[in-house]
Structures are given as structure tokens and as C-alpha cells.
Image: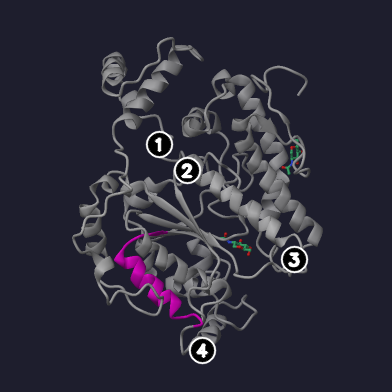
Amino acid sequence: MAKFSTSSRNKPSNMTNDGCLYMGGAVFAFLLVWCGWSYANPIVFGGNNFMLRIVSDMRSECCTHPTPNLRFDPPDSTFYDDSELRYSIDKKVTGWDDKRKEWLKRHPTFTAGSKDMIVMVTGSQPNPCQNPIGDHLLLRAFKNKVDYCRIHGYDVFYNNVLLHPRMKSYWAKLPVVKAAMLAHPEAEWIWWVDSDAVITDMEYKLPLDRYNYKGHNLVVHGWPKLIYEEKSWTSLNASVFLIRNCQWSMDFIDAWANMGTISPDYKKWGEIQRSVFKDKLFPESNDQTALIYLIYKDRRLTDKIYLEGEYYFKGYWVEIVPTYYNITKKYVGIEREDNLLRRRHAEKVSEQYAAFREPHLKEAGNGRWCWRRPFITHFTGCQPCSGNHNQIYAEESCWNGMLKALNFADNQVLRKYGFVHPDLLDSKTVTDSLFDYPDEGPW
Ligand SMILES: *[C@@H]1O[C@H](CO)[C@@H](O)[C@H](O)[C@H]1NC(C)=O
Ligand SMILES: CC(=O)N[C@H]1CO[C@H](CO)[C@@H](O)[C@@H]1O
């Protein structure tokens, strides 16, 4: 279960792996000049090892990303000037790969980082929530996503209008994702995250290399066995997905949306879905079953669709919430052992400290029964906005579960601001997070 590390950024760089350490000094000197990096009196936190870790990470950080120029849009015409282009889900976009490439060519300051660029897209209904604490929970769940995106340098778009009047409830996300692809030609990926999903590992980065390796264009949490053998409508989850900004995705979204409420055959699709996926009890065609159906019908799609089952790309809250307490204890234990992880730092350089932590998490595993922080906790069935939660969950456990998830995540953020919630169920109270926590004091 623990066989991969999180992302290329978090792996020790090749320089260290290849026994190139002797170059460290030379590279270090070079970087000092090249990047104007000054660290006159380096604090040797963690000894030589720390300096080497800094050098190896500086190589990848320093000189590769020019700043995107936000004030430059040359007059040359691009797809935006094509009067035929429509953002609406019921109009096809063609030749998108070339159009996007053309745009990037004319905006070269965006090209460098574009392969890792992610825009997170999320949203909720246009009207106030019926549940009295619904808007509060949505606000906090959005704050959680903003925090994550700020830490990792991603953009985030919150949509709260229906972009197509007939694409409602679970179908509403597809028009938004498509529009976001057109609005963000600079981004390689659009990452849809449902409003009731909470990011509970603020350090974890999506392992994009894994999805780029064989050119996968869509990533969802799921297992092939459950699709092809068990034929279950919960064999994957469509509440969180990562989709590449390319023509394949445009076409796929068309095919997917055509099983939805804009389709003249909407009713028929519901019947077809139920005839194949026997555990689906409600009659309407929904986005998740539609996606499973497409993959079930055409197995070759798995060349392009990555079914991620190795970490909590999206995890079920009932399974996860009870684990926060023990996980917190494990992480505190790690920090006791490694003074580098206890060092205070600017929020901006959080990714570096995530990389420092990574070697300690080798044994943690990922996913069920493991003690790495779960990446995403999804409150399936809780319906925080309407309040119409699934009857199998008590209202209390839904809302308390969400508060715990939000505060568990918030603690990872607030730490950089000098504070911490001592009790995950008490959102109001924070205490100072003390210098060198958790080494000293009666914790
Ligand atoms: C937390 O750890 C304790 C002690 O190791 C164990 O008994 C308990 O089952 C764990 N709780 C969860 C939810 O894993
Ligand atoms: C693959 C996966 O994550 N499946 C889960 C999707 O969500 C339902 C709950 O709605 C779980 O029961 C599945 O295990």
C-alpha cells in the first residue's frame, strides 16, 4: 500500500539519488549567484543533511518558473475572437488542442509552468441553504479549499449559478468544468471538487507524474473490479475528478453530458443504467452512473481514464473521521523526532516542509487502515446545504464529522499563523502553537 511517494516535488531529487552529492557545493555556489539567494548565516537545523536537502530542492525551485505576465494579451486573434465559439455545454468545441496551444504560444510567460497548472473548480446552488448552518458549513468548506490552493499555488473558481438551466443538481458541474477549460487555457488540469468534500491533508500534492506517465486525461477514485465484475454504481465516485484541459476531455464531457438532463433520452438512460447496475435503486440517470456506464461499455477508455485507488483521492467520511485522533498523535510523534519539522516557517514554503516530512511517512501507507492523513474527506449523503441528509446518518454525526474534518485541516493551516484548535469539535477556541511544539511542555 505504501509503494509510492506523493509527487515528483516530494521525492528526493535525482541529484541526491544519483550520488551527485559532490556537485552540491558547486551547484550551491552557482545558485547563490544566479538567484541572488542570500542566507548569510544559515541556521544549521538538522545538520549537513538539512543543507543538502535545501540545495537539492533549490535546484528545482530557483530558476525554472518565470512570473506569468498578467498584463499581456497581444492583439493577434485567438479562439476568443471566434464569434462561433460557445461556452455552453450543448455546443461542441472542436480543435481545442491547437487552439489552446496557439494561445499559449502567444502568452509565453504562461507556458513554462503550464504542465503543472491546476484550476480547482467547485460550487454550490444559487440560493441560500435551507439548512440553518448550511451556508456556514459551505463557507468553511470553501475556506478549506482556498487554503489548500494558496499553499500549493493553484487557482480556484467557485461557481454558484446554473450555467445551463437544464443541467441541475449533480449534472450542474459539467457545464462549469467545460467553461473553466475555456476560461483557463493556461491550465493543464481542471480539478472538480464537490462543495461537501474537505481536504484533510493540506500537504499532499496530486501525483500528476503518475497521470502524465501514460497520458491519462481523467482521474477519478475507483476500482476496475467493481465496475466490470461487481457492476456497482458506487464503483467509482464522480464527486472529485481531475480532467486534462484538452480536446479528448471536451469530447468526453459531451458524451457524458448526453446521458444527462439535456438529453432527449434522459429517461431511457436512467433505465439502461438500472438494468446494468443492479444496486442503483433510484430511476434517474445520474452523472456518476453515467460515467461508470461509459467506462463499462468501452474498456479502452481506461487507457485515458485513471481509476485512482491508492490514496484517498476522495474518501468516505464515515470511515475517515474516527481516524483523525490517532493520526494526529502519529504526526506529533514524528515531529518530536525531527527538529526540522518543528521549525517555524513562512506559509509560502510549506511544500518544502511537506517534502521533509515525506521520509517519515514511508510506513504510513495510504487509504484505509493507514495512518497518513487522508487527502480528501467527502461527506457523502450529508447534504449540508439542504440538510436533507441520508437517514442512515444522524444529523449530529454529519455536522460534527464536518466540523472535525474542517478543524483537523484548519490546524494544519493555523499552525503557520501561530495558533491551533486544541479540540476539533470546538471551532471557536484556539491557543498559541508554541515555539518548538511539540518538543517542550506538557502536551
Ligand atoms: C486508535 O489507536 C488505539 C490505540 O492504538 C486503538 O485501540 C484504536 O482502535 C485506534 N482508533 C482508530 C479509530 O483507529
Ligand atoms: C470508489 C469509491 O470511492 N467508492 C465509494 C463512492 O462513494 C460511496 C458512498 O457514496 C462509497 O460507498 C463507495 O465505496
Give the extent of the magenta segment: 243-261
The CA distance from mark 4 to mark 3 is 33 Å
Q: Looking at the image, do the residues carrying marks 1 and 2 touch, with CB atoms under 8 Å apart? A: yes
| Vertical side of 312 occupied by 380: above or below | below
Residue type at mark 2?
A: Lys
| Vertical side of 151 occupied by 181: above or below | below
**Picture colour scheme:** one colour
Q: Looking at the image, do the residues carrying marks 3 and 2 touch, with CB atoms under 8 Å apart? A: no
The CA distance from mark 2 to mark 4 is 40 Å
Query: Outermost residue toward the left?
Result: 76
Horizontal and vertical percent for residue 358? 50, 32
Residue placed under numbered mark 3 in the picture:
131
Q: Residues within 10 Å of mark 2 (few under 14, many from 20)?
A: some
Residue placed under numbered mark 4 in the picture:
268
| Vertical side of 73 occupied by 422: above or below | above
Q: Residue at x 71, y 61 (%)?
A: 134
Q: Residue at x 25, y 54 (%)?
A: 104
Horizontal and vertical percent for residue 211? 38, 52
The CA distance from mark 3 to mark 2 is 33 Å
Q: Residues within 10 Å of mark 3 (few under 14, many from 20)?
A: some
**Camera-nearest residue between 74 and 353:** 74
Residue type at mark 3?
A: Asn
The CA distance from mark 1 to mark 2 is 8 Å
Element on which disc 2 rests: loop
Quarter where residue 386 is shown: bottom right
Residue placed under numbered mark 1 in the picture:
9
Closer to the chain start, of discs 1 and 4, is: 1
Horizontal and vertical percent for residue 302? 39, 64
Residue placed under numbered mark 2 in the picture:
205
| Vertical side of 122 occupied by 144: above or below | above
Residue type at mark 4?
A: Lys
